[in-house]
Amino acid sequence: MLSYLLLIFSYLVGSIPCGLLMGKVAGTDIRKSGSGNIGATNVNRLLGKKLGVLTLAGDAGKGLLPMALTGWLLTGNDSRQLWILLSGFFAFLGHLYPVYLRFKGGKGVATALGVVLYCVPPAVPAALVVFALAVFLTGYVSVGSLAASALTPCFVWFLSGSLEKTVLAVCIAFFIWLRHRENIVRLIHHEEKSWKKAPKE
């Protein structure tokens, strides 16, 4: 019974809209400005780096903390590792489909970061390098997110050798790509917003 309650708890924690709360503190509804997304990228664009970083930390924490709590409370449980992974996935789903916002949430990258950080910490630097390189080369945050999420399952498998953790990483990558489908369409039509400065005339 406790295991199932922890999954519900993980989902509810994952549903907490950190970006929206940061916007409320600053007097802005970020759903009505910029990309309309509640994630750290839009917060950073609209409200600055400080609140953007705080949103990133909060969203990542939503993935990591429920897993840590589940691991602590289920010490001695034979299926402890499975429940930890499931709690991370439920927290991730909570961010994507938050009950508090009528299931309209973010794209899950930061929360996925927290999940991977708990599961396979060494995979995070590798994913961040891919993200940074992709953004630097293309100027698109969305490309960085897509590239990092696509390669993270490979990093998880190589560094942990765990089939369960790799399956979790694959599922997370699938949902990240699904949530980025509008970005993918804009990229195809060269309509995606770039972070590279326009060249001076």
Image (cartoon, helix red, strand yellow):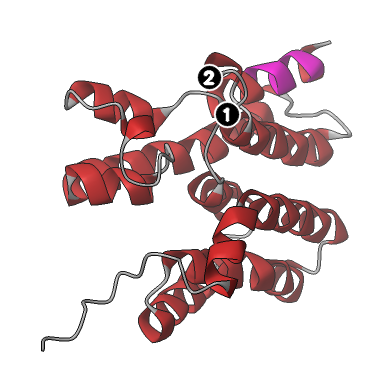
Q: Tell me if label 1 and label 2 are in contact, CB under 8 Å.
A: yes
Q: Nearer the viewer, residue 94 or 79?
A: 94
| Range drawn in magenta | 4-9
Q: Using the image, determine if residue 37 lies above or below residue 149.
A: above
Which amino acid, mark 2? Leu
The image quadrant that residue 7 belongs to is top right
Q: Residue at x 63, y 25 (%)?
A: 10
> Mark 1 Cα within 10 Å, few/some/many (few <14, many 20+)?
some
In terms of secondary structure, where does tag 1 sit? loop
Position in image of residue 139 (x %, y %):
37, 76
| Quarter of the figure with residue 155 | bottom right
In the image, residue 7 lies in the stretch drawn in magenta? yes
Q: Is residue 148 above or below residue 57?
A: below
Q: Which residue is mark 1?
A: 104
Name the kind of residue labelled 1 in the image.
Lys
Rendered position, 142 above or below 172: below
Could you tell me what secondary structure mostly forms the magenta stretch? helix
Q: How many numbered dots are placed on residues in this image?
A: 2
Q: Position of residue 61 (x, y in %)?
A: 46, 38
Q: Secondary structure at mark 2?
A: helix
In the picture, the quarter occupied by the N terminus is top right
Position in image of residue 185 (x %, y %): 61, 63
Question: What is the number of the mark on residue 176?
Answer: none
Residue at 60% x, 47% y is: 115
What residue is shown with label 2? 101
Mark 2, Cα crowd under 10 Å, few <14 / some 14-19 / many 20+, is few
- Closer to us: 71 or 58: 58
Q: Residue at x 86, y 61 (%)?
A: 163
Q: Quadrant of the C terminus?
A: bottom left
From the viewer's perspective, tell me whether residue 42 is left or right of residue 180. left
